[in-house]
Image: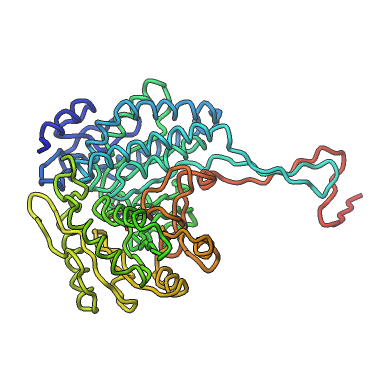
Amino acid sequence: MADIKKIRNDAFKALGLTQENSGVYNGKWVEYNKENALDSISPIDGTLLGSVSTASPNDYDKSIKIIEKAFLEWSVTPAPTRGNIIRKISRSLEEQKANLGKIVSLEAGKVISEGEGEIQEMIDVGYFASGLSRQLYGSMMVSERPLHRLYDQYVPLGPIGIISAFNFPTAVWSWNSLIAAVTGDTSIWKPSSKGSLAAVAVMKVIAKVIEEESVPPIFALVNGRGSKIGELMISDKRLKLISFTGSVKTGKRISTVVSGRLGRTLLELGGNNCAIVSEKADMNMALKGVAFGALATTGQRCTSTRRIVVNSKIYDEFLSKLISIYKTTQIGNPLDKGILVGPLIDNNAISNYEQAIQTAINQGGKILYGGKVLSREKGYYVQPTLIEAREDMYITMEETFAPILYVFKYNTMLEAMKIHNDVPQGLASAIFTNDLKEEEYFLSARGSDCGIANINTSTAGAEIGGAFGGEKDTGGGRESGSDAWKLYMRRQTVTKNYGDDVPLSQGVTFDID
Ligand code: NAD
């Protein structure tokens, strides 16, 4: 049995955390204040890990002024120099990977490999961003006017705001902040109030690099409630972009407020991800992909597999094998060896799990496996659950952040695709098949309507090199890899006349002689 107290104490010591931690950083740590401090409680066994102070409106305002000032210097620092700093950040995160991973595991209830995987994601984003720092280029166009040059360039946007969700308490910050930093932006981060300690731990590592390298305070951290600090951020015109990761419900509020001030948003909202399992699939691959997608992080990933559509010819065999996997998957303390399913984040998540299962039953769903709460005191544990579902069950249109997998049967690909797409969200999708025609159909305009489309691999577990995000109610944002960096910059079309006259476009004449 893993000794939670010892793991906590060792990681705290290595990272410089204490029982009472400042949760506000803006180039300096603002002194810990007991009032409105957040308790970080481990969902593994209810241990109080520590307390984190929150930002007052005054701390918030001061932090914004600091990153606004830092922007003036950072935005004109050559991008490759910025990239060198971000590379050093990645190296420091690498040195503290195990300790940071433990804090994520303790606070979010993730198994150790997933806690460390989250830190690896930050390291990878940092190296990716560092490489990007020499590739922030626009296109050159040809001008219709003689002796003219026409091109677009990308200019830093300004200070930006990052609001993140509890389930990836640190990685989401890096997807945004490290890419934004190489583009020349500065940023302020409000983590989830359920991820406050992990945010402080990461910022401790980052702050050291910033101070050692004498970099202006380009990253600020303001812990606090969404209704307080979050609301201040979204209505603050000084923040040119609000990158928000969280539920569809909160995302709609953020979108309304930010667009009301004509600000920019980058929205990464909930998913309702589906995998199609064809009779032409490699069954073992499909089983592994579906099990990982539905069970990993206890169904608390935005990309968790929430629905599967299985061909009727293999339905019984696939389901009986999947049920066997569910039966043998070990649930418990995620710090123990062999455990694949840890706790849910809190008691509220347990209630949502229970409610969704009851609603599914009321709407005609049949429980194939699971459905029980295992513990709601000193740790929040549930049985992963499989429910045979029908298309008219509205509960299957919703994202319940718990390990509940709805199972559908199909006969034709047309039917499978309809079930797959017929939900409000559009984040991740998958098909398991070895048939080229089915693959291509899935990837065609009539196929998956999601931002992420996977062939023969899980809906969950994206790589940082691709642009991450989804369509429809998922919000349309793209983060991390590919050319997502462009969202953190202002595009400017430049026309340069190096002739001796001012010829006009479209043949327009304007003779003033
Ligand atoms: P949530 O919407 O409850 O909270 C997200 C963040 O918003 C938190 O920091 C919270 O404090 C803040 N917030 C709440 N009200 C606010 C307000 N009025 N103004 C400003 N900020 C406010 O989400 P959660 O429960 O932390 O996370 C789970 C959700 O996040 C799921 O729906 C999941 O799918 C989604 N998610 C999406 C992605 C993605 O990339 N698409 C990634 C991770 C999580």
Image spot of residue 31 (x, y percent): 22, 32
Image spot of residue 200 (x, y percent): 26, 36
Q: Is residue 228 above or below residue 156?
A: below
Report the side of 68 relative to 171 (left or right): right
Say if residue 427 shows up in the picture: no
Say if residue 102 shows up in the picture: yes
Q: Quadrant of residue 172?
A: top left
Q: Residue furthest right?
A: 513
Camera-side residue: 454 or 494? 454
Q: Residue furthest left?
A: 377
> What colour-coding does the image apply?
rainbow
Report the side of 494 relative to 194 (left or right): right
Report the side of 122 relative to 226 (left or right): right
Camera-side residue: 281 or 404? 281
Which image quarter has ligand 1?
Answer: bottom left
Residue in the picture at 33% in, 65% down: 307
Q: Quadrant of residue 405?
A: bottom left
Camera-side residue: 103 or 321? 321
Image spot of residue 149 (x, y percent): 77, 41
Camera-side residue: 202 or 60? 202
Residue in the picture at 34% in, 34% down: 26
Image spot of residue 22 (x, y percent): 23, 35
Q: Is residue 273 above or below residue 3?
A: below
Q: Is residue 61 above or below residue 345?
A: above
